[in-house]
Amino acid sequence: MRILIVEDEVFIALDLEMQLMDMGYEVVGIAGTKVTAIEMACAYVPDLALVDLHLAGPSSGAEAAAFMRAELGVPSIIVSGSLHELTEADIAATAPVALLGKPFSPVKLHAVIRDVDAARDR
Amino acid sequence: MLDAPILSGRAILHAIPVPAIIMSTDLLIIDVNAPFEEAVARRRATLLDRPLFDEFPPRPDTPNLEATIRASVARAVDTRQTDALEPGRHDIVMPDGGFETRYWRLSHSPVTENGEVTCILQLVEDVTAEVTQQLLLEARERTAAEGASLSFWDLNLVTGKLIRSAGVDSMHGFAPDEAGDEIEPFFERVHPEDRERVRMELFSAAERGPGPTILEHRLLLPDGSVRWISARGEILLGPVNGEPHLVGMVVDITEFRQNEEQLKAALANQKMLLDEVNHRVKNSLQMVASLLSLESGRASPETREKLLSASTRVNAIATIHASLYQDGDVTSVAVDQQLRDLCDHVAASSGCDVRGISIDLDVTPIRLCPNKAISLSIIVNELITNALKHAFHGREEGRVRVRLARDAKAGELVLTVIDDGTGSSEAVEGQASRGSGLGQRLIQMSARQIGGRIEQPCSSEGWCTILRFPVSV
C-alpha cells in the first residue's frame, strides 16, 4: 500500500514515515500544506492519505482530504488533537476511512492502518 | 418697660398654649413662652433682649427669610392688623451646631397702647409634619405618573385598537400623535426578523385566553438603530362583548441585552482559547511520543527498551490529558475510564495478546482532581509495566488484576495491583523489590504526593502491591 503523509509537525511526520515503513508500506511523500498535499497526491496518486486536520497557516487538512477524495478517489485517515471540532460538513466532504486522535500510540496507529489495509483487500 | 399693660401682656403670652414671642418693632426679643422654648429647643433666659435674627439666623440658602419676616412685621405695624405668612422653611440651629429642617407658619399681631404700636406678638406654628407629608405625596404622584408614562399599554386583540402612554410612542420612534390609535404602525417598527414571531405570539396569547404573557423582541427604528424591548402583560376580557385585551408594560432592555451579548462573546472566546491550548498540548504530547519512537527506531535493543518505558510514562500522563477534555469537565478526571485507556495502551504496547496475558480492571467509578489522577496513573503504569516485564518469564499465560475501591470507614481509596506470576516467594535474583530503581522511586514519590502509603504484603501467588490514599487531601 502506498501512503501520503499530510502533517506539518516535522517530528510527527518523520515518526509516521518510519513506522509506516517498518510496517512494510511505501511512503510516497510528506506534505506540510494543503497545496503541497494536492500536488503530491496528483503526482503519485497514493492508495491512502494520512491527513492532519490542522496544518500550518491558513491551509486546511480537511480541504486537502476532500479534494483527494473527490478528484482522485484517494481515501484519507483524519488525524487530529481535536477530533470533536470536526464538523458534520467536514465528515461529509472528506468521508474518512478512519479517525485517529492525538496523541496516539504506535499500537493504535498500527491497528488503524491494518484495519484500513484489510478492508481495502476485501 | 415694666409698666402695667406690658406686664399683663406678658402674663397673657405665658397663657397662650402655642409657641409665641413678644418682640419690639425692631425685632428684639422681649419674652417667649414655654411652648416656644420647647419648639426651638432653647431656654427662655438665653433669648431675652436678643435680636431675633442673631438667635435664629437664616440658613445661607434661604436668604429671603429675614426680609419676609421684617416686611410682615412692618405691614402689621402699618395696618394695625395681624399679618399671617404662608408656611415657610426656617431651619433652626440645634445644640450640636447643625441645622434641623423645619417648616413654620408665622403670624405677627401688633400690640397697641394709646394708639401706638408698642410691640409685636408673633405666633409660631410648627407645620413640618404637614408640609413634609405633602411633599412626599407630590413626589409619589410625580414618580407614579412618570412610571406610567414610560410603559403602559392596552391592546384590544379584536379591533387592534391600542391605548398607550406617550412613552410607548417615543420608544418606537414615533412623534406624539404620529402613530394613530391602531397597533399596525407599531408592528411596522418591529424588526423584520422578529415580526412574524411577535404576530404569532400575540395570536397564540389571544387564543390561550386570560393569563400572563411575556414578549421580547427587537425594534428597527427609522434611523436604522436596533433596540430590544420586553413587553409583559396579561390577557383580560374587556367590557365590550368580552373582547380580549392585552394589558401591560413595556421596557427598553437594550442595555441588558448588550451586556448579555458581551458576556456570551467573552465566554465563546474563552472556550476557543481553551480548545486551542488543549489542541497544542495534545500535539506536543504527540511530538514527544514521536521523538521517542523515532529515536528507538535507530537504537540498540537495550536503549530501545529504555525509550519504550519512557514512552509509556509519557503516555500515562497523556491519557490524563485526553480524558480531561473528553467529557467537558476540566476540573476532574473520570479515573475508571482513564485507567482503562492506560491499561489498554500498556497491554497493546507490550504485546499482551500474543503473550497470553490479560489485564483485568475493577475500578470503582470515581472522579479525582488532575494532580491526584496523574500520580495514580504513574503508579499504575509502573506497577503493570513491572508485572509484564518480570512476572511471566517462561509462562504460557498470566493475569494482572488492577482494583481501585473505596474504604469508606478509613476515608481512603485502595489500589491493589496483583499478578499470578513469579511472586515474592520465588523472588527473582533475591530482589527485595521489583522493577528499575527509577520505577520504584517514581512509585514512592507519587504515593507520597497524594498522601498515600505503599504496602507489599507477602502473597502466596504472584506479586501484590497495595496503595492506600485519602479520598480528599
Image (spheres, rainbow, N blue to C red):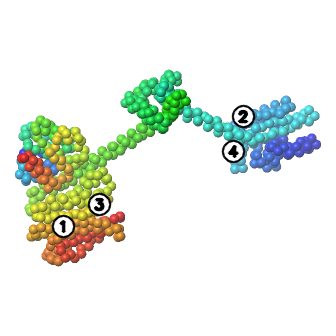
First-in-chain label (3 vs 2)? 2
Q: Amino acid at mark 4?
A: Phe
Q: Residue at x 24, y 74 (%)?
A: B456
Q: Secondary structure at mark 2?
A: helix
For disc 1, the chain is B
Q: How many C-alpha atoms fall within 10 Å of the one at disc 1: few (<14), some, or many (≥20)?
A: many
Q: Amino acid at mark 2?
A: Asn
Counting from the top left corner in percent of width and height, residue B43 is at 79, 49
Q: Secondary structure at mark 1?
A: strand
Task: State the separation of the CA atoms marked 1 and 4.
Answer: 90 Å
In this view, the residue in front, B299 or B84, is: B84
Q: Which residue is mark 3?
A: B365
Q: Are marks 2 and 4 on the same chain?
A: yes
Q: How many C-alpha atoms fall within 10 Å of the one at disc 2: few (<14), some, or many (≥20)?
A: few
Q: Which residue is mark 2?
A: B64
Q: Quadrant of residue A28?
A: top left
Answer above or below: position of B89 versus B316: above
Q: Which residue is mark 1?
A: B400
